[in-house]
Image (spheres, coloured by chain):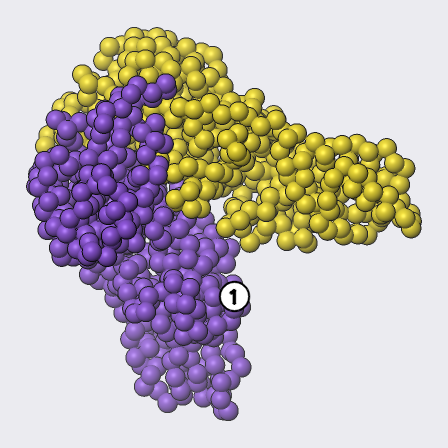
Chain colours: A purple, B yellow
Amino acid sequence: MHMKKLTAGKLKDGPDINIGLVGLGYIGSEVLRLIVLQSDYIMKKIGRNLKIKKVAEKDIASKDKTVKKYRDIVFTDNPSEIINDPDIDIVVELIGGINPAFEIITGALRNGKYVVTANKDLIAKKGAKIFHEAEKHNVDVLFEASVGGGIPIIGPLKSSLASNNISKIVGIVNGTTNFILTKMQENNLGFADALAMAQKLGYAEANPASDIEGKDAANKLAILASIAFNSRVVFDDVYREGIQKISISDILYADELGYNIKLLAIGSEEQGRINVRVHPALIPKKHILASIKDTFNAVYFYGNYSGEIMSFGRGAGDKPTASSVVGDIISIARNYDRNNKHVIFGCTCFTEKQIMPFLETSDKFYILMDVIDRAGVLAKIAAVFGSKSVSIQSMVQKQASAHGAARLIFITHNTLNRSLYEAINELQKISVVKKIINIIRVEELEG
Amino acid sequence: MHMKKLTAGKLKDGPDINIGLVGLGYIGSEVLRLIVLQSDYIMKKIGRNLKIKKVAEKDIASKDKTVKKYRDIVFTDNPSEIINDPDIDIVVELIGGINPAFEIITGALRNGKYVVTANKDLIAKKGAKIFHEAEKHNVDVLFEASVGGGIPIIGPLKSSLASNNISKIVGIVNGTTNFILTKMQENNLGFADALAMAQKLGYAEANPASDIEGKDAANKLAILASIAFNSRVVFDDVYREGIQKISISDILYADELGYNIKLLAIGSEEQGRINVRVHPALIPKKHILASIKDTFNAVYFYGNYSGEIMSFGRGAGDKPTASSVVGDIISIARNYDRNNKHVIFGCTCFTEKQIMPFLETSDKFYILMDVIDRAGVLAKIAAVFGSKSVSIQSMVQKQASAHGAARLIFITHNTLNRSLYEAINELQKISVVKKIINIIRVEELEG
C-alpha cells in the first residue's frame, strides 16, 4: 500500500518498508504487535508504512493463534525465505544466541538488507565480522535493544554525543542482579532468599547463572565500550565477578560506611588503553547510581564536552525491548531509499586500543576478615599490607563472629589489583588471620 | 579539503560540510572551539570534515583574539553574508532571543540550508512558522541544545522512542532553581540567601526573573510537549508559577512528610487534551527525580512501550550546550548530500490537540496556614473544604508561629484547581483563619 499525503506529514511519503522478522518468541511477538498496533502513529511520523511481510519461527506450530490472526503476513519456519526475499528491506533478528543468528544476519547483509537485532551475545562476540559485512554492502546493523532494553543509549552515543571523547562508562545494566541486591538491602534478605524472590517474580531464570555471574552485563559492557572508546571490545576482554558472594553482612557494613552495593559494568580509557570490568562495588549513597533500584537499569558516562550524562529506564521486558527494536527500524525507514542505500551510523571502531591486563588496573577495596582477637594482631596485618604497598584508608572493628575473634573491615586507598591479591595471599598464610570473608571493590564515583 | 579514505571509516567519505555560525558569545565560542579541537575525531566518525567557513558576530570588535586565531574563517558582523553564501550548508544560530534570530533562521531555510539552534525562546514561541519553512524547502531545523543543555532528549524522543505514545513528561529543566532549592534544603538557607549563593557562583543571573519565575522552564516544556504529544504547544499555553514563595519552612515540613520540593515542568495528555504546567511541587523522596541535585537537569517520561525513561545530566553551560549543538550538526552531516536534501526528523506536530484550561485540571495540594488556636476551628475549616468538594487526605498541626495561633498543614486528595481556589477564597474570609501561608502542589510520581 502506498500512503496518501498527510495533512502535516513532514517527511517525504514513500513506499512501504518491508520487514522480515526472524524469531517469534517473547520479544518478537511484542515487536509484531507494536508494529501492527502503532502503525498509523508511525506512519504519521515517518511518512511511510512499516509492513511485516514475513515471519520466520522454528516452532511455528506453537504459534497457531498468531498465524491465524495476521493473515496478510507469510509465516515460515525457514529464515532463508526472508534473507532471500528481494522485497524485504529490513531483517529483524530476535532469536538470540550465536548460531544461526550470525548466519542469518550476515546473510541478510550480503543481500543488501538492513538488520536490526537485540542480540547482545552476538554483537559482543562477533561484532567485528558483522560490521565488516555491513560496510561491504553499504547497509547497517542497528542494535539499540541489545543494551538497556527500552533505554536509548546507543543512539544518543552515536549521534547527539558523537563529538565527545568518553572517558568512562559506569552502568547498572542487569536488572536481575540489581533487583536481588535491592531486596537484600531493603528487606534484609540473604542472597539465596533474594534470588528465590526474583525467580518467583519472573525476574530471574531457573538457571540464573548468566545474570548473577555477570555474563549478561559483560556482553553489554563490551558493546558500550566498543562505541564509547571507538575500539572493538569483546566479551572475553571483560574482567568479571558476579554477585554470588555478596552477603547480607557486606550490605549492612557498606550501608554503615555510607555505601550501597551494586553490580557495575565499568569501562574507562586510561592513557590510551581500555579498562573493562563487571563486578560488585560499593558506591557512595549520595551518587545518583545508588538510587537505581529494583530491575531498573542506568548507564552513566562522562563526555569531555557533555559532562556527566545518565540514561535510566527499564532494561528488559518485552515492551521496552520492542520499543528499542522498532526505534531502530524507524531510524532506518526514515528517508530509506532502496536504490540509494547508505550506512546510517556505521561502526565507530576506527582505532585499535589495547585492553589493560586486569592485574595492572587499580582499585580501592573493602576487605572483610575475621582475625584472632589479641594484642599485636593489627600490627601484623598492617605489616603485610605495607609490604605489598597496599595503603589502608580506614579500618573498623565489628562485633566478633565467634569467641576470641574480631571482625575487621579495611578500606584501602587505590591500589594495584596485583598488589592486593599478593597481600591477600600473604594474609591467608599468617595464623592471626582466621578468615578473609570477602573482598569487594569500592567505586568513589564523582558527580 | 577533501578527506582521504580512512582505514576504518564506514560512512562514505564526502566533501567538507560548510558551517556558518551566527553568534560568538559564551556558547558560540565553545562550539567554534569544539569543532576545531575535535575535528579529526569527528572526521573519523562521519567520514567528512566540519568546516566553519564564516562567523557572524554583531560585536566583532570585542572578539579580536578569536578573529586572529582562526585565520581560515571569515568573520563578519552581518549574518546575511552567511545566509546568502551559496557554499554554506548548515547555519548555526546562537544569538538567542526572537529577533533577529527568527529572520536569520527562516532566511537560511529559504535558501535551502539546514539550521541548528539552541534557541528555546524562539522554538517555543515561533516553532510552527519555522518548521513550516523548513518543510517547504525540504531541509530541517535541529534544536537538541534548546532543552537540557548537553543531555540527549529531543533526539531520543524523535528516534529511538518514536514508536511510543508518551503519556507524561516530568522534567527538572532549570538548573538555577534546582540549585536554589537544593541549597535551601541541604544548607538550611532561606530563598534570598540561596539565590544570592547561586548568583555568586554564576548559576543565576543578576536579574534572575526568567529562571525563578519559571519562564525558562516553560519554554523548554513547550518544546518537549510539542514533540511528545505531536501537537504544537507554545510558551503561553503553559501555566506557570515560580519558586519565589517557597520558604525554608515549606522545605522542612515537606521533608518531614517524606517529600522534596522541586520546580517541575509537567506535561501530560489527558483524554486527548494537553495539560502543561511549570510549578514547584512536593515529590516523594524515594522517586528518582528527588535525587536530582544542584544544577543537574533530568527529564522523566512515560512511553506506552518503553515504560519509564529518564535522561539526566548538565542542563546548561558552554561545553554541554556545545556538545548538543555539534551533535545536531553531525546528525545533519552524516550522509549529507547537497544535491539531494531531505528532512531528517521533521516536525512531529501532525495533530492538533486542545490545551486544558488550567482550572479544569486536578492536583493534590499542600496547604500551610495559621489559624486561631481554639476549639471548633478545625470543624469550620473542614466545612469550607467540604463545601467546595476539596477532600483532605491528612492534616498535621505544627508548633504555633505566634501566641494563640496554630499552624496547620493540609494535604488534599486530588482536586480540581477551580475548587481549590474557591475553597481558599472562602477560607480567607472566615475569621478563624489568620493567614494562608502557602499552597504547593504535590506530585505523587509513580515508578
- Taking the image as shown, residue A366 lies to the left or right of residue A241, namely right
Instruction: Work out whether residue A212 can be spotted.
Output: yes
- The image quadrant that residue B372 belongs to is top right
Where residue A21 appears, as percent x and y from the top left, is 21, 45
- The image quadrant that residue B195 belongs to is top right
- The image quadrant that residue B443 belongs to is top right
Residue visible at 71% across and 38% down in the picture: B439
Residue type, mark 1 in image: Glu
Of A6 and B1, which appears nearest the observer? A6
- Taking the image as shown, residue B426 lies to the left or right of residue A322, namely right
Of A433 and A65, which appears nearest the observer? A65
Of B145 and B444, which appears nearest the observer? B444
The vertical placement of A393 against B388, above or below, is below
Secondary structure, mark 1, is helix
How many residues crowd mark 1 within 10 Å: few (<14), some (14–19), many (20+)? few
Where residue B97 appears, as percent x and y from the top left, is 48, 18
In the picture of the structure, the residue carrying the numbered disc 1 is A186
Instruction: Work out whether residue B114 can be spotted.
Output: no
